[in-house]
């Protein structure tokens, strides 16, 4: 397929997965609106329909909870092909049935991109409408996912990280007691090969965490205090730090001095906190189990998001470039979700090795902003090759490039349109 044909296919995937203002990640496996999927999808729509891009993000915020949280899934209509559905979550925090925790807050960054892409000023007006929502969501993150003010954000469930099955969660997850779950039937393994999905022992614990949070009615302060899983994550932390920089730029552009001042405080707090995730021996940022105090021992693709977060000090950048080149020498396609030299690496099991297009996009953006165009371009070219060879899959093997998980995937299509497609970079040049 030519690049122009791939552009066309990517557009039709977004249009096909559009449910009337919001987009599902893929039919069957993920039949609802997912938080960060929608935000990346907006970038894709913005390449051919700005209004539709805004609609996507606005519909996500329609599901914002009273306490400020923006849920990871909005269950706008019941779909029996997905488990766990709304009745298992048992939440009551917002206007739309939803899951009970959030997902990485990329929204402020993408909203700023949408504003920058529209010189007419209309986009800025729409951004003004969402500014209070963004402020509340970010405040919620700081209050309930960093209750001690350490400048790092924890996730209360592996799914909150968006990198669901990462080896970083293994030890903390094993410490979760399996209880209050009853018999259940998974649906994911009927859509895709079980060899690529989490094991049953993991699923039991995913559901046990949900049961524990349900027992405190998803009260965020209680969840922060008692949830059996509470792990500081470099992924969410870096994405949030970056999002705050973009939110600050938006607040300044909109003349919101008070908000801007508040956000500046958040940025300093997060910059200081991020340092505590630095693993001296590994020379990379890792997770920290807030319950046991233990650091995780592997390098995930999120470590490479430090420059995206604006952390471009020589030591950090140099160490990441060394890791980058070492990993590039091991696998054909970057960036594997977990270090191929780590014992937990598996090239095709979900988040334990495979490559995701939108992670590559964010890493490349950070590297380019830090002045490392070469490595940024390697990421773009690898992403383009993967898609050209294997189609718009959910994720890809870093070794063979084979596509896996769900097919006709929205965020893969969106990232192609917004960044990876060579025709896009030709237009931009
Ligand atoms: C999986 C991914 C998550 C994503 C969702 C929908 O759960 O781990 O990041 O949002 O699928 O694509």
Image: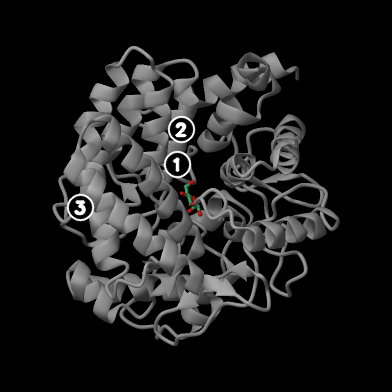
Q: Which mark is residue 367?
A: none
* Secondary element at image label 2: helix
For residue 91, side relative to residue 416 (left or right): left
Q: Classify 162 as above or below 16.
A: below
Q: Position of residue 137 (x, y in %)?
A: 25, 51
Whether 252 is drawn above or below 134: the answer is: above
Which quadrant is the C terminus positioned in?
Answer: top right
Image x and y of residue 65, in percent: 18, 51
Within 10 Å of disc 1 (Cα), the crowding (few <14, some 14-19, many 20+) is many
Q: Residue at x 48, y 80 (%)?
A: 172
In the image, is 3 to the left or to the right of 48? right
Residue 209 percent coordinates (x, y): 35, 74
Where, by quadrant of the figure, is residue 266 drawn?
A: bottom left
- Mark positioned earlier in the residue sequence (3 or 2): 2
Mark 2 CB near ligand 1 (8 Å cut): no
Quadrant of the rendered image containing residue 101 = bottom left
Residue occupied by mark 2? 41
**Can you tell which mark lies on residue 68?**
3
- Residue furthest to the top: 120
Label whose residue precedes the other's in the sequence (1 or 3) = 1
Q: CA distance from mark 2 to mark 1?
A: 6 Å
Residue located 60% across and 38% down the image = 407
Ligand 1 contact, mark 1 (Cβ < 8 Å): yes
Asked whether 176 or 130 is in front, the reply is 130
Q: Give coordinates of residue 278: x percent, y percent.
A: 56, 71
Furthest toward the right, the residue is 329
Disc 3 to disc 2, C-alpha distance:
22 Å
Residue at the (60%, 75%) spot, across then down: 279
Which tag is nearer the camera, tag 1 or tag 3?
3
- Please tell me whether mark 3 or mark 2 is closer to you in this view: 3
In the image, which disc is placed on residue 37? 1
Q: How many marks?
A: 3
């Amino acid at each position: 397929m030519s690049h122009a044909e791939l552009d066309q296919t990517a557009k039709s995937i977004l249009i096909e997965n559009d449910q009337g203002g919001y987009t599902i990640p893929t039919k069957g496996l993920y039949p609802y609106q997912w938080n960060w999927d929608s935000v990346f999808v907006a970038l894709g729509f913005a390449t051919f329909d700005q209004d539709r891009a805004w609609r996507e993000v606005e519909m996500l915020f329609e599901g914002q909870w009273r306490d400020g949280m923006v849920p990871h899934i909005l269950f706008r209509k019941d779909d029996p092909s997905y488990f766990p559905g709304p009745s298992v979550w048992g939440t009551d925090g917002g206007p739309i049935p939803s899951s009970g925790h959030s997902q990485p807050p990329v929204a402020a960054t993408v909203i700023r991109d949408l504003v920058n892409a529209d010189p007419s000023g209309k986009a800025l007006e729409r951004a003004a409408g969402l500014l209070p929502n963004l402020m509340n969501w970010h405040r919620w993150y700081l209050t309930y996912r960093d209750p001690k003010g350490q400048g790092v954000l924890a996730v209360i469930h592996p799914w909150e990280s968006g990198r669901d099955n990462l080896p970083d969660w293994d030890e903390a997850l094993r410490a979760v007691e399996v209880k209050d779950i009853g018999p259940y039937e998974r649906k994911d393994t009927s859509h895709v090969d079980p060899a690529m999905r989490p094991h049953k022992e993991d699923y039991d614990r995913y559901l046990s965490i949900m049961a524990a949070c349900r027992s405190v009615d998803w009260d965020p302060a209680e969840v922060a205090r008692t949830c059996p899983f509470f792990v500081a994550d470099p992924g969410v932390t870096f994405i949030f730090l970056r999002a705050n920089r973009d939110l600050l730029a938006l607040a300044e552009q909109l003349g919101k001095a008070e908000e801007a001042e508040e956000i500046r405080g958040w940025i300093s707090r997060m910059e200081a906190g991020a340092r505590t995730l630095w693993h001296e021996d590994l020379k990379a940022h890792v997770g920290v189990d807030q319950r046991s105090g233990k650091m995780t021992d592997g390098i995930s693709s999120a470590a490479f998001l430090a420059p995206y977060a604006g952390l471009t000090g020589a030591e950090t950048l140099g160490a990441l470039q060394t890791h980058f080149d070492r990993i590039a020498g091991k696998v054909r396609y970057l960036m594997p979700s977990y270090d191929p030299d780590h014992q937990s690496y598996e090239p095709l099991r979900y988040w334990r090795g495979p490559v995701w297009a939108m992670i590559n996009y964010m890493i490349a953006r950070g590297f380019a902003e830090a002045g490392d165009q070469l490595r940024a371009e390697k990421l773009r070219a690898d992403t383009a090759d993967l898609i050209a060879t294997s189609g718009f899959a959910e994720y890809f093997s870093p070794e063979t490039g084979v596509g896996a998980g769900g097919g006709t995937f929205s965020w893969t299509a969106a990232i192609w349109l917004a960044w990876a497609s060579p025709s896009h970079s030709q237009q931009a040049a």
